Image (tube, rainbow, N blue to C red):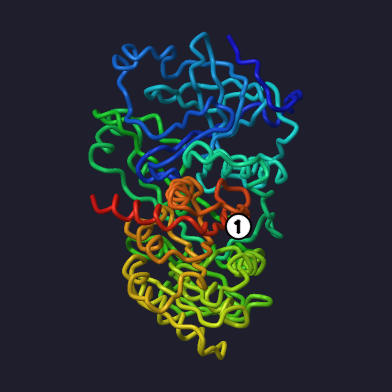
């Protein structure tokens, strides 16, 4: 029995798409990060990571398919991890696979069974979506770096917007109008935009995998081949006694989403690494407008951004990797923080001062930045001095302590706060500190809309009103994006903030 639900009209499959292979990667080190993976139009259920189950366990749990079995599936949706998803059989069993798109009919091989779902790899595409395009990278079907090269860019933007909407609804529990999440702002460059890559060397398999490889007749010399690239999607067919598999590195002589300057330097960097007796760490190639390409992670580099000026930072440190969209992204965040009557800005997780310095130039009376990385704070102060600013100050502290230290200097009714936390989102301590400060406006920038949705729920419960969300596609061809959400404090929220503050201490 095949699923007949289709979001797109299928068309016959060209011969060049008949056989491909793309396999999911779910583990504690995968892109999913062990937190959230959800799908549009799948009945409101999310799909997270599960431990690999034995065949007997799967039988007790009612899995209708065995590993290695071939099935034909009509793909219904696209998950937040980039996998196509469909339901099959009378129980509408969930099957997920990379490399397939909504509306397509595909022959898949079941490769891993989990509690409540199976994951599969594409064996043959029977009917193709009109949104399917030919991937430009020769290793796209194996490399885990990109998820959407086979999907037309306009469709990538539509699906990314839908995933943000779903995260806010299903994870955040927020009842928002459809147009609350605005259309995704596209990247001016869809390829050759990435200004930093870190190709990984192939590491030898752990001892237990080595035994399994030997028992399976796989050459250890082949397994230890000195590939330099990115982890593959395929977990391999060889398991050890515990059922665990070993994921290899896909050799990447080029990277089509990296800048052309990086690709020009990549062969020499790979050759130099192979001359070393032992490759023990990832390579680094960082491209900046001032310093071209550097490979030393401790080197200082400078990026000149149109309309924003020059910013220096450590090559191996954090700085956004798509300079083609960065000026419009920064200007949007700074503009979003502005509001009549607001004079002060607090930039939490400020890094080297990109938002804070851009905001201090003419938009705010005084700007304060908080950053836990001492080296980044040193660069932020250096950048502010180079921009000739005296109304911006930076504090080296974690988010919650920094907010508490600066709270007395920031009148809440005249203060806006920008937060741009890492993927795990705001800690409970940081959320409580922000709600104690009670800024009039909060601009939440996030590279993970799932953890962002979780945090937004707390702010709404404490009396903040959501004004709008604007996604920016800083990472074309991948499932990632940045989302900017604006919240304003309601006038009757003081009692709710106190209730949340008391609850956090229980």
Number of numbered discs on residues: 1
Left or right? Give the position of 296 relative to 244.
Answer: right
The image shows residue 201 at horizontal and vertical percentages of: 40, 55
293 or 429, which lies in front? 429
Left or right? Give the position of 16 relative to 318.
Answer: right
The image shows residue 155 at horizontal and vertical percentages of: 70, 41
Name the residue carrying label 1. Answer: 474
Left or right? Give the position of 108 relative to 425.
Answer: right
The image shows residue 129 at horizontal and vertical percentages of: 71, 30
62 or 279, which lies in front? 62
Measured along the vertical axis of the image, is residue 92 above or below residue 96?
above
**Residue 379's image quarter?**
bottom left
Measured along the vertical axis of the image, is residue 204 above or below residue 430?
above
415 or 258, which lies in front? 415
311 or 338, which lies in front? 338
Q: Dot 1 surroundings within 10 Å: few (below 14), some, or many (20 or more)?
A: many
Instruction: Give the position of the N terminus as an image quadrant.
Output: top right
- Who's the residue at 67% across and 66% down the image? 328
Measured along the vertical axis of the image, is residue 179 above or below residue 79?
below
Q: Name the element at disc 1.
A: loop
* Residue 395 showing in the rendered view: yes
- Who's the residue at 72% across and 27% down the image? 8
The image shows residue 470 at horizontal and vertical percentages of: 63, 54
**Residue 501's image quarter?**
bottom left
* Residue 291 showing in the rendered view: no
- Who's the residue at 50% across and 44% down the image? 144
């Amino acid at each position: 029995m095949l699923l007949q639900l289709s979001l797109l009209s299928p068309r016959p499959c060209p011969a060049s798409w008949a056989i491909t292979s793309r396999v999911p990667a779910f583990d504690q080190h995968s892109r999913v990060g062990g937190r959230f993976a959800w799908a549009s139009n799948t009945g409101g259920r999310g799909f997270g990571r599960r431990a690999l189950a034995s065949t007997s366990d799967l039988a007790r749990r009612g899995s209708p398919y065995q590993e290695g079995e071939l099935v034909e599936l009509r793909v219904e949706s696209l998950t937040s991890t980039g996998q196509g998803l469909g339901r099959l059989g009378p129980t509408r069993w969930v099957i997920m696979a990379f490399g397939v798109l909504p509306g397509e009919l595909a022959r898949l091989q079941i490769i891993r069974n989990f509690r409540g779902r199976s994951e599969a790899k594409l064996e043959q595409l029977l009917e193709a979506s009109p949104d399917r395009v030919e991937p430009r990278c020769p290793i796209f079907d194996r490399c885990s770096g990109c998820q959407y090269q086979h999907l037309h860019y306009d469709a990538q933007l539509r699906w990314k917007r839908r995933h943000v909407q779903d995260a806010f609804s299903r994870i955040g529990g927020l009842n928002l109008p459809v147009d609350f999440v605005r259309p995704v702002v596209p990247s001016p460059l869809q390829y050759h935009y990435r200004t930093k890559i870190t190709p990984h060397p192939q590491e030898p398999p752990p001892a237990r995998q080595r035994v399994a490889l030997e028992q399976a007749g796989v050459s250890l010399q082949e397994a230890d081949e000195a590939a330099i690239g990115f982890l593959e999607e395929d977990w391999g067919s060889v398991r050890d006694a515990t059922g665990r598999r070993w994921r290899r590195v896909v050799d990447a002589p080029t990277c089509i989403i990296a800048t052309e300057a990086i690709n020009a330097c990549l062969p020499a960097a790979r050759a130099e690494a192979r001359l070393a007796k032992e490759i023990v760490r990832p390579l680094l190639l960082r491209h900046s407008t001032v310093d071209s390409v550097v490979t030393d992670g401790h080197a200082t580099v400078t990026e000149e951004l149109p309309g924003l000026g020059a910013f220096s930072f450590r090559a191996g440190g954090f700085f956004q990797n798509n300079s083609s969209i960065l000026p419009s992204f920064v200007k949007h965040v700074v503009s979003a923080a502005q509001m009549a009557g607001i004079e002060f800005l607090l930039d939490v997780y400020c890094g080297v001062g990109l938002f804070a310095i851009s905001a201090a130039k003419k938009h705010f009376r005084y700007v304060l930045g908080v950053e836990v990385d001492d080296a980044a704070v040193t660069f932020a102060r250096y950048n502010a001095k180079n921009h000739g600013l005296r109304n911006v100050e930076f504090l080296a502290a974690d988010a919650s302590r920094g907010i508490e230290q600066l709270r007395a200097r920031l009148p809440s009714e005249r203060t806006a706060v920008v937060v741009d936390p890492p993927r795990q989102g705001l800690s409970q301590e940081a959320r409580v500190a922000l709600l104690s400060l009670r800024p009039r406006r909060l601009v939440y920038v996030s590279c993970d809309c799932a953890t962002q949705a979780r945090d937004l729920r707390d702010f709404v419960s404490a009396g903040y009103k959501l004004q709008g969300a604007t996604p920016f596609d800083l990472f074309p061809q991948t499932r990632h994006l940045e989302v900017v959400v604006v919240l304003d404090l309601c006038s009757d929220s003081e009692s709710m903030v106190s209730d949340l503050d008391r609850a956090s201490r229980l």
